């Protein structure tokens, strides 16, 4: 399968069409951005690590019955997946308070939440990805009806349960993460985008060390080393 024309370029990936109108190719970039694009950099090899991590997690979730766009990893930086119309809702799943949740609501950083929190953000860079409630989603016609929001919430919680246990077995704590969903050619809502430390907060269960993009956000350094360690643990090759 070969790339044809560039369909879309985002902060972390380029999306290419293929000879099959139902399939796209994602090209994972080495670019790093934070704070709505205000902080930018690049880390050689980061894109390949995200592709490999995403591949393993998509394969795991697919085997557990989660509907996803994943087809196969083509090479280090390219993934073949189903074409999907993006639902412009970023789904934020939180197990532990940190980041914007602590800043905005004054919840103690590191506090374990009494239940899994699922939030919606509007996927709109110009507006700064504002928070959405169900009524906003319906007014903006981001979904067809309230039942689709419940369907998305169901899968967000199910994915969280699966990945929390998966990571715990590998010495990692799943703090929070972002998911995106889209509609395939048959109109089914499926999990899309990527599943990587760019979109996940992961803490080492022993040291509490950040193993995700917070290393870039906070200027801690060692981002590629952390991502490599996450991949090694997923593959079962932790030293």
Image (cartoon, rainbow, N blue to C red):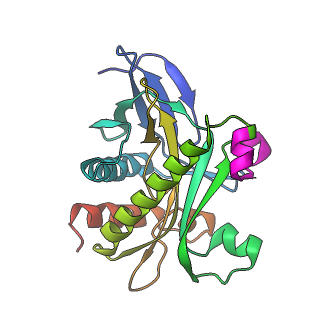
Q: Residue 71, percent across and down?
A: 30, 35
* Location of residue 149 with respect to 175 vertically, above or below: above
> Which residue is painted at 43% across and 46% down in the image?
47
Taking the magenta stretch, the answer to whether it contains residue 131 is yes
Along the viewing direction, whichever of 28 and 89 lies nearer the viewer: 89
In the displayed structure, does residue 217 sit left or right of residue 161?
Answer: right
> Which residue is painted at 37% across and 39% down in the image?
77
Along the viewing direction, whichever of 142 and 123 lies nearer the viewer: 142
Give, as a single range, the part of the protein colored magenta.
Answer: 125-138
Task: Answer with the quarter of the image where residue 138 lies.
Answer: top right
Find the residue positioned furthest to the right: 127
> Which residue is painted at 29% across and 51% down in the image?
56
Look at the image and tell me whether residue 179 can be seen. no
How many callouts does the rendering have?
Answer: 0
Task: Answer with the quarter of the image where residue 69 lies.
Answer: top left
Q: Residue 132, percent across and down?
A: 71, 51
Q: Quadrant of the C terminus?
A: bottom left
Taking the magenta stretch, the answer to whether it contains residue 93 is no
Task: Answer with the quarter of the image where residue 141 lies.
Answer: top right
Q: Quadrant of the N terminus?
A: top left
In the displayed structure, does residue 25 sit left or right of residue 61?
Answer: right
């Amino acid at each position: 399968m070969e790339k044809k024309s560039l369909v879309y370029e985002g902060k972390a990936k380029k999306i290419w069409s293929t000879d099959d109108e139902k399939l796209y190719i994602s090209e994972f970039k080495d670019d790093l951005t934070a704070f709505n694009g205000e902080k930018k950099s690049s880390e050689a090899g980061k894109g390949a690590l995200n592709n490999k991590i995403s591949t393993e997690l998509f394969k795991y979730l697919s085997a557990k019955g989660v509907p996803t766009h994943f087809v196969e990893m083509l090479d280090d930086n390219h993934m073949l997946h189903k074409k999907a119309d993006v639902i412009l809702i970023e789904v934020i799943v939180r197990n532990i308070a940190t980041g914007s949740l602590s800043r905005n609501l004054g919840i103690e950083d590191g506090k374990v939440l009494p239940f899994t929190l699922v939030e919606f953000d509007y996927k709109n860079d110009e507006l700064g990805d504002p928070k959405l409630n169900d009524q906003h989603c319906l007014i903006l016609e981001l979904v067809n009806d309230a039942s689709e929001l419940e369907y998305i919430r169901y899968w967000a919680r199910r994915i969280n349960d699966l990945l929390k246990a998966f990571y715990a077995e590998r010495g990692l704590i799943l703090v929070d993460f972002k998911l995106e969903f889209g509609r395939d050619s048959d109109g089914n809502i499926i999990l899309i985008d990527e599943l990587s430390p760019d979109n996940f907060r992961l803490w080492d269960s022993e040291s509490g060390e950040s193993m995700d993009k917070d290393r870039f956000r906070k200027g801690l350094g060692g981002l590629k080393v952390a991502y490599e360690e996450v991949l090694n643990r997923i593959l079962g090759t932790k030293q």
